[in-house]
């Protein structure tokens, strides 16, 4: 740039500006979609976490007889028929 002596001159080009705007919009859209998917996955994980903690609290609060019934219930839920 020193050869042309345009070091502090802004580059002004309508086509360049439009191209940069389009590229920026594509990048922003791409990352927005990634954040949206991440938010959806986080919601699913949070739902699963809440269910797991609920069952954990239920199992820890159970006494001997109810623990056996809980274990049979869990086994029925996960066993293939």
Image (spheres, helix red, strand yellow):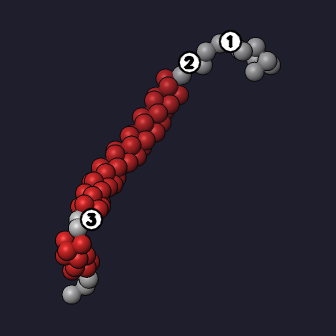
Q: Residue furthest front?
A: 64
Q: Nearer the viewer, residue 1 or 58?
A: 58
Q: Nearer the viewer, residue 62 or 12?
A: 62
Q: Residue at x 76, y 13 (%)?
A: 5
- Residue 32 image position (x, y, % from top left): 38, 40
Q: Is residue 20 left or right of residue 66?
A: right
Comparing labels 2 and 3, the label whose residue is closer to the camera: 3
- Residue 78 image position (x, y, % from top left): 26, 78
Comparing labels 1 and 3, the label whose residue is closer to the camera: 3
Q: Which mark sits nearer the N-terminus, 2 or 3?
A: 2
Q: Which mark sits nearer the N-terminus, 1 or 3?
A: 1
Labelled pair 2, 3 in contact (Cβ < 8 Å): no
Quarter of the picture containing the N terminus is top right
- Residue 56 image position (x, y, % from top left): 30, 61
Query: Circle 3 sits on which residue?
Result: 59
Quadrant of residue 80 within the rendered picture? bottom left
Q: Residues within 10 Å of mark 3 (few under 14, many from 20)?
A: some
Q: Is residue 79 left or right of residue 10?
A: left
Query: Circle 2 sits on which residue?
Result: 12
- The label shown at residue 8 is 1
In three-dimensional space, the C-alpha distance between marks 2 and 1, rounded to whole angstroms, equals 12 Å
- Label 1, secondary structure: give it: loop
Q: Residue at x 42, y 43 (%)?
A: 30
Q: Number of callouts in the render?
A: 3
């Amino acid at each position: 740039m020193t050869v042309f002596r345009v070091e502090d001159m802004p580059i002004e080009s309508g086509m360049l500006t439009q191209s940069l705007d389009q590229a920026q919009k594509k990048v922003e859209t791409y990352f927005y979609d990634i954040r949206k998917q991440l938010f959806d996955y986080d919601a699913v994980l949070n739902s699963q976490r809440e269910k797991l903690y609920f069952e954990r609290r239920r199992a820890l609060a159970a006494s001997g007889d109810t623990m056996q019934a809980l274990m049979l219930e869990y086994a029925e839920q996960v066993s293939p028929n």
